[in-house]
Amino acid sequence: MRDVIFHKIYIGADHAGFALKQCLIDFLEENKIIVEDCGALDTTPSNYADLGHQVAFKIKNDPGSGGVLMCGTGIGISMAANRHQGIRAALCHNVYTTQCARAHNDANVLALGSRILDESMAKICLDIFLKTPFEGGRHTVRVNHIDGGI
């Protein structure tokens, strides 16, 4: 895979997202993307917030990296990650939301709902997330407001 925005992807999911995470790890590895699995390591019940925080910490300490997070809906895990300064986790469901998340919001974490998307759409979203550059321009001011707070 060429023209990938991030040099490394940190990936995490709770028990509900475990199967989709494994599928996306395979997709990343097949496309020669460096990936680090941050858990969960099986379907034993786990806390999505812990995994969202763990991936966020990894990204904050590795400039130029990105992340992928999954839980049943993608909502809780993205909320946890977004508690961290500089993390812009976007919950995406389709091509359009994923393109806008990268191009307009400079999302550095893709959040997916494992009970919302099938594997095919999740792979499409991940591919778009990895390749879509941030447009900058008028969007830069808005992204700076996200990172700076009110």
Image: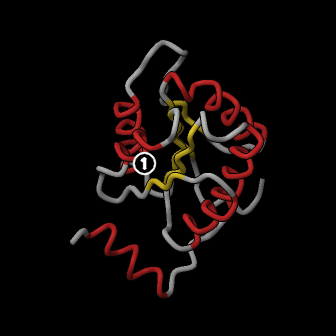
* Image location of residue 71, percent across then percent down: 50, 34
Residue under the point 49% across and 55% down: 90
Residue in the image at 50% along x and 41% along y? 74
Residue type at the position of mark 1: Ile
In terms of secondary structure, where does tag 1 sit?
Answer: helix
Residue at the spot of label 1: 59
Q: Is residue 100 above or below residue 85?
A: below
Name the quarter where the C terminus is drawn.
bottom left
Residue 22's spot in the image, x, y percent?
A: 65, 27
Question: Is residue 19 found left or right of 72 in the rendered image?
Answer: right
Residue 133, percent from left and from top = 62, 70
Residue 85 is left or right of residue 10, and the answer is left
Residue drawn where x is 51% and y is 39% of the image: 73
What's the residue at 64%, 25% (across, down)?
Answer: 19
Judge by depth and name the residue closer to the eye, 29 or 104.
Answer: 104
Between 144 and 16, which is closer to the camera in this rendering?
16
Residue 4 vs 53, above or below: the answer is below
Total marks placed: 1
